[in-house]
């Protein structure tokens, strides 16, 4: 579990570095806002339980 979290953190940092240097290419995709909000809320809930 902690390994996955560390990998995601490193991927996020790499993406930030790419965005800062102009090498991040975004792909636009249609998504349902309700599903996106539910997923983010679930992630936030899991994170808040760890603290």
Image: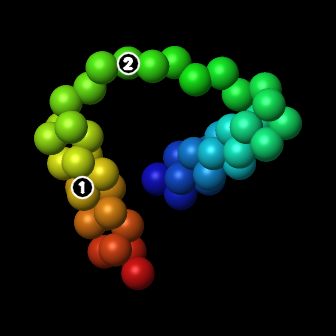
Question: Considering depth in this image, is 1 or 24 the residue closer to the camera?
Answer: 24
Q: Is residue 2 left or right of residue 23?
A: left
- Which disc number belongs to residue 42? 1
Does residue 14 appear in the picture of this structure? no
Q: Residue at x 45, y 19 (%)?
A: 28
Q: CA distance from mark 2 to mark 1?
A: 21 Å
Farthest residue in the bottom direction? 51
* Mark sitting earlier along the chain (2/1): 2
What percent of the width, then of the height, locates residue 20?
Answer: 79, 42
Q: Quadrant of the C terminus?
A: bottom left
- What element does badge 1 sit on? helix
Classed neighbour count for the residue bearing mark 2: other residues with Cα under 10 Å, few (<14), some (14–19), many (≥20):
few
Does residue 22 appear in the picture of this structure? yes
Farthest residue in the left direction? 34
Q: Residue at x 70, y 28 (%)?
A: 24
Quadrant of residue 41 within the rendered picture: bottom left
Q: Is residue 46 left or right of residue 22?
A: left
Q: Is residue 42 left or right of residue 6?
A: left
Q: Residue at x 26, y 66 (%)?
A: 45
Q: What residue did someone put label 2 on?
A: 29
Quadrant of residue 31 within the rendered picture: top left
What percent of the width, then of the height, locates residue 3?
Answer: 58, 50
Check contact, mark 2 vs mark 1: CB within 8 A. Answer: no
Question: Considering depth in this image, is 25 or 2 the residue closer to the camera?
Answer: 25
Residue 12's place in the image compared with 29, above or below, is below
What percent of the width, then of the height, locates residue 49?
Answer: 31, 74
- Which disc number belongs to residue 3? none
Q: Residue at x 19, y 30 (%)?
A: 32
What percent of the width, then of the height, locates residue 25?
Answer: 66, 21
């Amino acid at each position: 579990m902690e390994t996955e979290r560390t990998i995601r953190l490193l991927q996020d940092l790499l993406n930030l570095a790419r965005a800062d240097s102009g090498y991040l290419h975004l792909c636009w995709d249609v998504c349902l806002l309700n599903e996106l909000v539910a997923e983010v809320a679930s992630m936030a809930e899991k994170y808040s339980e760890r603290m």
